[in-house]
Image (cartoon, grey):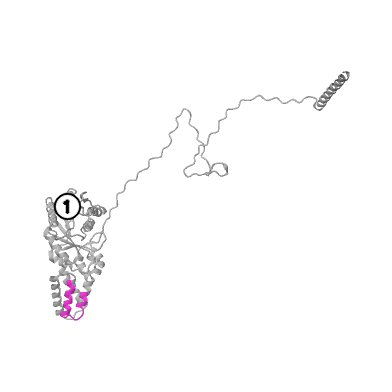
């Protein structure tokens, strides 16, 4: 027991000696213990404004690049942040896109046809190609140097084949025989001159070929257009409207062909191209006389210069259709006289057209002839034949498919073209 107390005493003394030794070493370095600097009193910091969010939004053409793990805009710079409005101020309304301005509707441009004067000369080449057989054959026979009975028979046959007609052919041949007998031997130029004179005489340049297209006694002139199926009446009316517009005439069209569904539409299209109104019925099969009556009435109210009335094509041997044509004429005349009745004939039908012309003339008193497709036939003699048959002049001729290929008939230009 005494030994245990001795050991504990030794351990205690060793521990105290070690502690004294450590304290002595520390003081030997600084002499004092090192004090930490006092912590300064916290100062009041100004309140920081939180960073404003970027309000830029990509426009319609902006693209977003997500390569590299972050989303960035391909625009070089971003729009600077906007300042929020004061709390006591209402936010400004978002701008609205202005309403798009509607373009003013533009009126369709109207065609302005050239004057019809001189068209026969302009289209002379086309006409001469069609009728060259007549002129060349006659010149070859007459200038051949030997005009015996057989040669004169050939001259007659050539004129008859050209639809000149028997009476006109006889007159031309008899006159040429006399001239050749008096002159003796003749050259081609002299024969050409004689033939030109004789044909021009048959065409009769003294006939009045003017179209009634001016106001009469305070009312518009009324022109009724008639003919058989397929002669091109509706197209002729449309082309005639262009001829009159070129002469500064105010025109009204009447679509009295109510049996053919497309006739009124076709006529209205022709009129619209040159600013000419069309009076029509919306009901297919309507009374054509009523439509014609309304057209003349509308022309009078609008103080037009002329009213052109298109009628349905009809076969000349159908008495009921011809009677209907007479009814149209009578109904129109209840409010206005008819100043012109134009009969449209297909020049390629030749002598067959003469019988048609006679029947129409009996029904409606034809005052003038329109020969269509004259450029497509070598039988130019139909001009002479139909004039002699009816005693009325050819006033207009169709020389092609173009809208301005309807020409006032010029007798001298026609004969020149035949003999070219």
Is 187 left or right of 81, judged from the image as shown? left
Image quadrant in which the C terminus is located: bottom left
Which residue does the image show at 16% across and 66% down from the upper left? 352
- Is any part of residue 206 visible from this angle? no
Q: Which residue is mark 1?
A: 288
In the foreground, 264 or 209: 264
Is 171 left or right of 113, judged from the image as shown? left
Residue 142 appears at what percent x and percent y? 19, 77
Residue 137 appears at what percent x and percent y? 21, 75
Image quadrant in which the N terminus is located: top right
Relative to 42, does residue 346 appear above or below in the rendering? below
Residue 143 appears at what percent x and percent y? 20, 78
Q: Which residues are magenta?
A: 137-160
Label 1: state its secondary structure: helix
Residue 2 appears at what percent x and percent y? 88, 18
In the foreground, 354 or 197: 354
- Is any part of residue 327 visible from this angle? yes
Residue farthest to the front, as pictured = 1
Task: Considering the whole magenta stretch, tell me its main secondary structure.
Answer: helix
Image quadrant assignment for residue 11: top right
Is 278 left or right of 68, judged from the image as shown? left
Mark 1 surroundings: few (<14), some (14-19) or many (≥20) residues within 10 A: many
Is 208 left or right of 12, judged from the image as shown? left
Image quadrant assignment for residue 168: bottom left
Give the total of numbered labels.
Answer: 1
Look at the image and say whether residue 141 sits in the magenta stretch: yes
Look at the image and say whether residue 224 sits in the magenta stretch: no
């Amino acid at each position: 027991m005494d030994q245990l107390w001795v050991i504990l005493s030794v351990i205690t003394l060793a521990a105290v000696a070690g502690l004294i030794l450590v304290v002595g070493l520390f003081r030997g370095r600084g002499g004092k213990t090192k004090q930490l600097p006092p912590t300064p009193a916290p100062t009041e910091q100004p309140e920081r404004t939180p960073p404003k969010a970027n309000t830029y939004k990509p426009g319609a053409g902006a693209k977003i690049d997500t390569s590299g793990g972050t989303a960035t805009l391909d625009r070089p710079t971003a729009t600077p942040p906007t300042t929020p409005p004061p709390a006591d101020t209402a936010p400004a309304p978002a701008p609205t896109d202005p309403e798009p301005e509607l373009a003013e509707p533009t009126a369709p441009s109207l065609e302005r046809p050239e004057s019809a004067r001189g068209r026969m000369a302009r289209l002379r080449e086309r006409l001469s190609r069609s009728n060259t057989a007549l002129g060349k054959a006659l010149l070859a026979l007459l200038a051949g140097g030997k005009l015996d009975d057989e040669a004169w028979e050939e001259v007659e046959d050539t004129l008859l084949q050209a639809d000149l007609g028997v009476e006109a052919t006889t007159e031309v041949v008899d006159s040429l025989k006399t001239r050749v007998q008096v002159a003796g031997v003749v050259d081609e130029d002299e024969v050409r001159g004689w033939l030109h004179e004789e044909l021009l005489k048959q065409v009769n340049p003294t006939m009045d070929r003017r179209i009634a297209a001016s106001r009469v006694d305070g009312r518009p002139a009324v022109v009724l257009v008639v003919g058989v199926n397929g002669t091109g009446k509706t197209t002729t009316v449309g082309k005639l409207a262009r001829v009159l517009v070129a002469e500064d005439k105010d025109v009204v069209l009447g679509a009295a062909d109510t049996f053919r569904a497309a006739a009124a539409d076709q006529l209205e299209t022709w009129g619209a191209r040159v600013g000419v109104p069309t009076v029509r019925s919306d009901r297919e099969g309507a009374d054509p006389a009523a439509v014609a009556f309304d057209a003349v009435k509308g022309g009078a109210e609008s103080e037009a210069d002329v009213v052109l009335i298109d009628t349905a094509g009809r076969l000349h041997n159908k008495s009921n259709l011809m009677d209907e044509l007479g009814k149209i004429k009578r109904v129109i005349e209840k409010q206005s006289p008819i100043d012109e009745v134009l009969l449209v004939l297909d020049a390629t039908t030749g002598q067959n057209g003469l019988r048609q012309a006679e029947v129409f003339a009996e029904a409606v008193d034809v005052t003038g002839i329109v020969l269509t497709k004259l450029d497509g036939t070598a039988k130019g003699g139909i001009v002479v034949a139909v004039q002699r048959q009816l005693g009325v002049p050819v006033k207009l001729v169709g020389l092609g498919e173009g809208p301005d290929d309807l020409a006032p008939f010029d007798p001298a230009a026609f004969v020149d073209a035949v003999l070219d």
